[in-house]
Image (cartoon, rainbow, N blue to C red):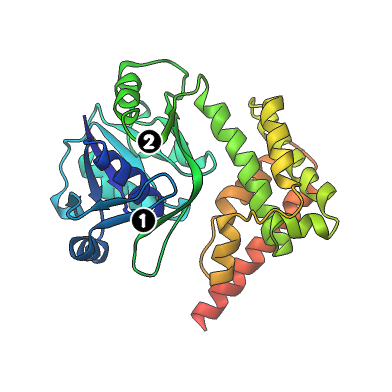
């Protein structure tokens, strides 16, 4: 099978690097600046599970794209989805499978509207990685999960073929029975983590030390109530793990959204928190902690926009 990965940043660079390492037919769709950097330096990944060096990674730019890929992995941020869809459009044929690794659920409907319902799979990743000053990928711990599947829960031949290929790599691959439930469970956790981190401008451990355990758990419960209203109640064991992670004493854990704020960058606040709040409002679910975190991020984005315009 032939694979196209949109972007060669932290997420796409890591998974694509592992796929190339395993001998899979993998190409990165990148912009001119990133293409020049990769042509000059190659793709480098530093990881606790083994480093990668690909001197000449296969690259393509938008003007050279053709519909000849079996699967496309989207590793963009939610606020870049519109441009990402336009970028991959020439590569999407009737049989192409699109695996989005974005947070939340709103992107699924947008992808189905832009392409075809059949093109779109569900997907998620669990990984901590970033790009350093040289443009190299830094993988920070042992987490390296890529999970995907048909949105209707069926075990299709194409999912089986992709799973067979990706199982040759050195990252963790899962095809859950219900990918939508898995996506909602991740959404609840990442919204709770990002919300409490950004609201308090602090790590999990610092929030715990300040007496914020009940606040963090309340935020998670509000997010889980929205998921349950949509028909995707988080499983008991998942809730237990989430609660433990959100209340761990001395934990340095922070969501990437807090680091975005610290850099003065755009965030996915509206996509991750705002979307949940809109659903809560539609369902008449009382979610004051979610509302506070969302308004906090909206105020940050408004201030950032005003500063940029000024």
In this view of the protein, which residue sits in the foreground, 13 or 82?
13
Q: List the residue tagged with mark 2.
A: 99
Task: Give the residue at x 54% y 55%.
Answer: 268
Q: Is residue 288 left or right of residue 94?
A: right
Q: Which mark is residue 137?
A: none
Residue 232 in the image: state x and y as whole percent: 63, 27
Q: Where residue 193 appears, x then y in whole percent? A: 66, 50
Residue at position x 84%, y 47% in the image = 214
Q: Earlier in the sequence, mark 2 or mark 1?
A: 1
SS label for mark 2: strand
Relative to 54, residue 21 above or below:
above
Q: Nearer the viewer, mark 2 or mark 1?
A: 1
Q: State the residue position of label 1.
A: 9
Image: 89 above or below 46: above
Occupied quadrant, residue 302: bottom right
Given residues 81 and 72, the one toward you in this image is 72
The quadrant in which residue 280 appears is top right
Residue sticking out furthest to the bottom? 310
Q: Is residue 36 visible?
A: yes
């Amino acid at each position: 099978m032939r694979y196209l990965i949109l972007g060669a940043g932290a997420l796409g660079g890591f998974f694509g690097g592992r796929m190339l390492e395993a001998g899979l037919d993998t190409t990165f769709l990148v912009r001119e600046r990133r293409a020049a950097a990769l042509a000059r330096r190659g793709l480098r990944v530093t990881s606790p599970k083994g480093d990668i060096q690909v001197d000449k990674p296969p690259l393509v730019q938008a003007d050279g794209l053709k519909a000849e890929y079996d699967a496309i992995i989207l590793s963009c941020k939610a606020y870049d989805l519109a441009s990402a869809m336009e970028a991959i459009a020439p590569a999407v044929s009737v049989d192409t499978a699109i695996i989005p690794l974005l947070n939340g659920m709103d992107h699924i409907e947008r992808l189905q509207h832009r392409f075809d319902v059949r093109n779109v799979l569900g997907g998620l990743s669990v990984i901590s990685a970033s790009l350093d000053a040289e443009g190299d990928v830094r993988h920070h711990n042992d987490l390296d999960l890529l999970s995907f599947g048909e949105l209707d829960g069926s075990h299709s031949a194409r999912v089986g073929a992709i799973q067979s290929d990706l199982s040759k790599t050195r990252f963790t691959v899962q095809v859950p029975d219900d990918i939508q439930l898995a996506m909602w469970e991740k959404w609840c956790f990442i919204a709770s983590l990002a919300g409490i981190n950004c609201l308090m401008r602090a790590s999990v451990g610092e929030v715990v030390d300040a007496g914020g355990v009940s606040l963090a758990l309340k935020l998670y419960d509000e997010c889980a109530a929205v998921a349950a209203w949509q028909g995707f109640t988080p499983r008991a064991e998942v809730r237990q793990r989430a609660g433990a992670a959100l209340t761990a004493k001395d934990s340095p854990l922070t969501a990437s959204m807090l680091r975005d704020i610290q850099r003065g960058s755009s965030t996915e606040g509206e996509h991750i928190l705002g979307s949940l709040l809109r659903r809560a409002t539609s369902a008449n679910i009382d979610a004051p902690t979610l509302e506070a975190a969302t308004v906090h991020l909206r105020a940050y984005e408004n201030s950032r926009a005003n500063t940029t315009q000024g």
